[in-house]
Amino acid sequence: MRMAMRGLAVVAALVMSVGLVTSADGKRTLKGTFEWNDSGKKGDLEAVFTPTGEGKWDVAFHFVFRGEPHTYAGTAEGSLASGALKGRVLNDNKNRTFVFTGTFADGEFHGTHAEVGDDGDHPTGTLTLKS
């Protein structure tokens, strides 16, 4: 019994150390920054990931741009611990689509974002996130 409890404690510590669990419902909140290419504007970014399946997430990005709060929401797929992560979100009015892609390494995500247009993706900037 004591050995089983110790083993369970080790597994729990490992899961927590790589940031796989942050709330009882599995939601993960990551914080970081964004940068917008055209204007050079930068700001704080909060991303809330809600699991929807193995390596699949609903995601909501919360940020302030030009003094106004925004939430861009959509879906993502990949790892929130290590490796590739990508997704697609709609702006507040749901009339513009953005994609993001990047990689998690050493607990940090570094990626790019782009607006989706009729003629392809147009790079709009960068973002970073960490637990």
Image: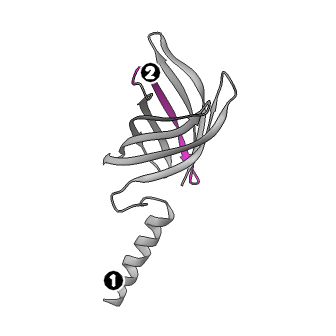
Provide the residue span drawn in magenta. 94-109
Residue 122, percent from left and from top: 54, 18
Q: Is residue 98 magenta?
A: yes
Residue 16, percent from left and from top: 46, 66
- For residue 11, above or below residue 124: below
Type of residue at label 2?
Arg
Observer-nearest of 45 and 93: 93
Type of residue at label 1?
Ala
Residue 42 placement: quadrant: top right
Q: Secondary structure at mark 2?
A: loop
| Residue labelled with disc 1 | 4
**Circle nearer the N terminus (1, 2):** 1
Question: In the rendered view of the protein, which quadrant contains the N terminus?
Answer: bottom left
Q: Main secondary structure of the magenta part?
A: strand
Q: Is residue 5 magenta?
A: no
Residue 57 placement: quadrant: top left
| Residue labelled with disc 2 | 96
At x 43% / y 58%, what residue is drawn? Answer: 20
Quote the CA–CA distance across marks 1 and 2. 52 Å
Mark 2, residues whose alpha carbon is within 10 Å: few (<14), some, or many (≥20)? few
At x 39% / y 61%, what residue is drawn? Answer: 23
